[in-house]
Image (spheres, coloured by chain):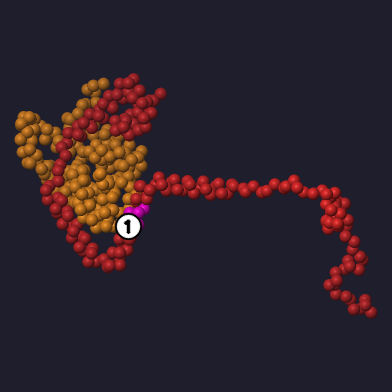
Chain colours: A red, B orange
Amino acid sequence: MLKCENVQPQLSAYVDREMPLWTVRLIRWHLKRCPTCAHEAMRIQQTDKILQQLDPVKTSDNFLPDLMRCAAAITVIEREQISAIRRILRRLESSFAWMRYSFRTRMRPYAVAASLALIVSVVSLTLYQPRLPLPSNDALTLAQVPSEKQALLVEFEIVPINQFPKPHLSSNRRTSPFTPVDQHQER
Amino acid sequence: MRTSDEELMMKCRNGDMSAFELLVMRYKDLITNFIYRSISDYHRAEDLAQETFLRVFRSAGRYEPKCQFKNWLYLIATNLCRNEIRDRKRRNTAYLDDLIPDNEDTSYVELMQDVSQLPDEVYEKKERQIIIQQTIDRLPENQRLALLLVSYQNLRYDEIAEVLECSVSAVKSLIHRARQNMKTLLIEVGIGESSHAKV
């Protein structure tokens, strides 16, 4: 349940409807039950009504012509000061800015759709695995191979690694062939 | 179809004076009112409003439509108002214009032409308006600007936060305090209900 000290600082925002709907409902519910806060809210609204009593002022008739004259003078001075290249650069810069702006405001949905499509295609290409052809069942057994061709077949034997025969190394080959031979020993 | 302010500003950036004129037409009254309520001097308010638009025109080349044009315009106007208020404080000057509204005569004439109101009613209304304006002037600078932006310019809190360059919660608290102060000051001057009149 909301307390008065929490509600009262929120009343201005409540009067201006500058809060989420659920908070508005909570405060409205509190105001129905708390006459002090309800009175406070009413006084804020009254203050606002008093402020609205001020009549708006209008600009004088010379406002716009004077302003446009000043603006035109600024343009002339700038044109005289800025060289042709800088003017072209500025025009280019402004058109790029305009493109950026229109992209941000108008093209955003298209850009989002295009990037989504790109992401989907990249992901699907990455995940796609082409199916390799399965081994065919037309392999021949040894008995089916003609006898003259049986000699061509390569024989092989599967040997477990612990039963693999150790290489036979002769005693004179234990030393490296590149070891320098001691000349005294040779004599 | 109504061309958006940002599009007009981009045209203005390319040197289109008619786009600038259209922007001025859209906002001149709003900006002048805002400045007038902030500094209570009609002629100075017009000068500052013109200065605001000239600043917009000068910086059109650098304009990037990152935020709303309206907020940017109010930001420039607010900065000019702040400078003016601080200058006045520094000089400690009381302007005659502060005491007598500039367009008083013309307003009275306009109001007198309105036959639906009695002359004393017209006078009372005018007096009341002067008192309200003087009460607004007594508010601290930031509170005054925030209150004016929400009450007369109908800006949202997030827009005001952008204009005053602070957070939305700061704006909320500024407006709340401004209204509290306003209420007290109005009771002091005899406008509005006293605190224990009705509970």
Q: Pick the residue in front: A2 or B191.
A: A2
- Tell me if A172 is positioned left or right of A37 in this view: right
Q: Which residues are magenta?
A: A96-100
Q: Which residue is mark 1?
A: A95
Q: Pick the residue in front: A138 or B55.
A: A138
Snapshot quadrant of residue B130: top left
Q: Is residue B59 above or below residue A79?
A: above
Q: Determine the residue positioned at 16% across, 39% down.
A: A56
- Tell me if A128 is positioned left or right of A9 in this view: right
In magenta stretch: residue A20: no
On the image, the x and y values in percent for residue A111 come to 42, 48
**Chain to which the residue tagged by mark 1 belongs:** A
- Location of the C terminus of chain B (image quadrant): top left
Q: Residues within 10 Å of mark 1 (few under 14, many from 20)?
A: some
Our reading of the magenta stretch's main secondary structure is helix
Q: Is residue A63 above or below residue A83?
A: above
Residue B10 shows up from this direction: yes
Amino acid type shown at disc 1: Ser
On the image, the x and y values in percent for residue B28 come to 19, 46
At numbered mark 1, what does the secondary structure look like: helix, strand or loop? helix
Q: Pick the residue in front: A81 or A142.
A: A142
In magenta stretch: residue A97: yes
Q: Which residue is at the far right?
A: A187
Q: Determine the residue positioned at 19% across, 29% down.
A: B192
